[in-house]
Amino acid sequence: MSGSIGFIGLGVMGEPICRNLLRKSGRPVLAFDLAAEPLARVAADGATATTSIGDVVAGAQTVFLCLPSAKHVMSVFESILPAVKRDQTVIDLGTSDVGLTRSFAKQLADKGALWIDAPIARTRQAAQDGTLSVMVGATAEQFAAVEPLIRHFATDVTLCGGTGAGQVTKILNNMVLFETVNALAEAVAIAKHSGVEPKLLLETLSKGSADSFALRNHGMKAIVAGEFPLRAFSTEYAMKDLSYALELGAQAGLDLRGAALMRTIFQETIDKGMGDAYFPVIAKLIDPSGFPQ
């Protein structure tokens, strides 16, 4: 077990992250996923394919999780808790519910193990390139212990505060992203109907105060290009993350009208059968005539 890495969840982001750990960490990697294809691919790259979550936990000192939602994390946690041992560390790379995160950390702490929230940001290409941004909830000492491993797949690694602070920061990152992408979709729709070429519009905005990561990536590469692939960050996943933000707002007694409007927009997009598409597909809701059918 000493020094070995476990990796559970080889999806769109998890597979390239696991591959970077394989290539750069110099440590044995034990991998698990319910899907046979990505498991076979990382095994071909040198990982040890396992047949259960328990096998990963039994053989790894540090276990990474890269799962779609709190529901999936809860399911996996049920297998982790009875198998985890003192001094093991579990690092959750997904965006998840803050209250659940703190509950998981407490339950592992009671067994002498450690749960760290370290949700990831940026694109699949960044996951492949090892240039993700990671927001970590941990003590300074815990952060110092895990940061070198995380830097095998991330260029920006930020200690955001104690347990759950990484999740809070990532949830708010996504809330701002969603609202920004909606503004971009509205701007592109107006441009199309007002005689301004959308690509030129966003290229021009990128030179001024409206510039953003969302503009250069979600705006240019998805909305302007009309590319909304299914194997990407879907509208349903976006809705899930937005619900976490609205829950935090409600707990704080805040009226998040912009986020609430985004919830309506996402729900309408899902209701029109676009829940599985990359979430900038909300542009089709705003301007259905602006995209080829």
Image (cartoon, rainbow, N blue to C red):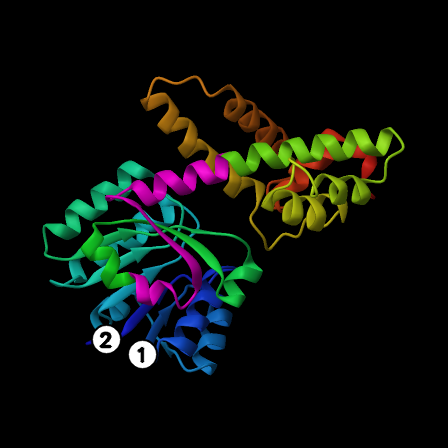
Q: Residue at x 90, y 32 (%)?
A: 195
Using residue 135 as the reference point, say whether residue 287 is left or right of it: right
Q: Amino acid at mark 1?
A: Arg
Quadrant the C terminus occupies = top right
Q: Amino acid at mark 2?
A: Gly
Q: Residue at x 32, y 23 (%)?
A: 251
Quadrant the N terminus occupies = bottom left
Question: Is residue 239 shown above or below 15?
Answer: above
The picture places residue 20, in percent across and down from the top left corner, at 44, 71
Observer able to see residue 81: no
Question: Is residue 237 shown above or below 57?
Answer: above
For mark 2, does the 10 Å Cα neighbourhood hold few (<14), some (14 to 19), or many (20 or more) residues? some
In front: 38, or 244?
A: 244
Q: Residue at x 46, y 81 (%)?
A: 45
The picture places residue 10, in percent across and down from the top left corner, at 45, 64
Using residue 180 as the reference point, say whether residue 71 is left or right of it: left
Give the residue number, with chain letter if any, for mark 2. 3
Please state the extent of the stretch shown in magenta in the rendering.
147-175
The picture places residue 202, in percent across and down from the top left corner, at 74, 41
Q: Residue at x 34, y 52 (%)?
A: 118
Observer able to see residue 169: yes
- Residue furthest front as drawn: 208
Give the residue number, with chain letter if any, for mark 1. 27
For mark 1, does the 10 Å Cα neighbourhood hold few (<14), some (14 to 19), or many (20 or more) residues? some
In front: 204, or 177?
A: 204
Q: Is residue 278 magenta?
A: no
The picture places residue 64, in percent across and down from the top left corner, at 33, 62
Q: Pick whichever of labels 1 and 2 is earlier in the sequence.
A: 2
The part of the image, by quadrant, that contains residue 71 is: top left
**Mark 1: which secondary structure?**
loop
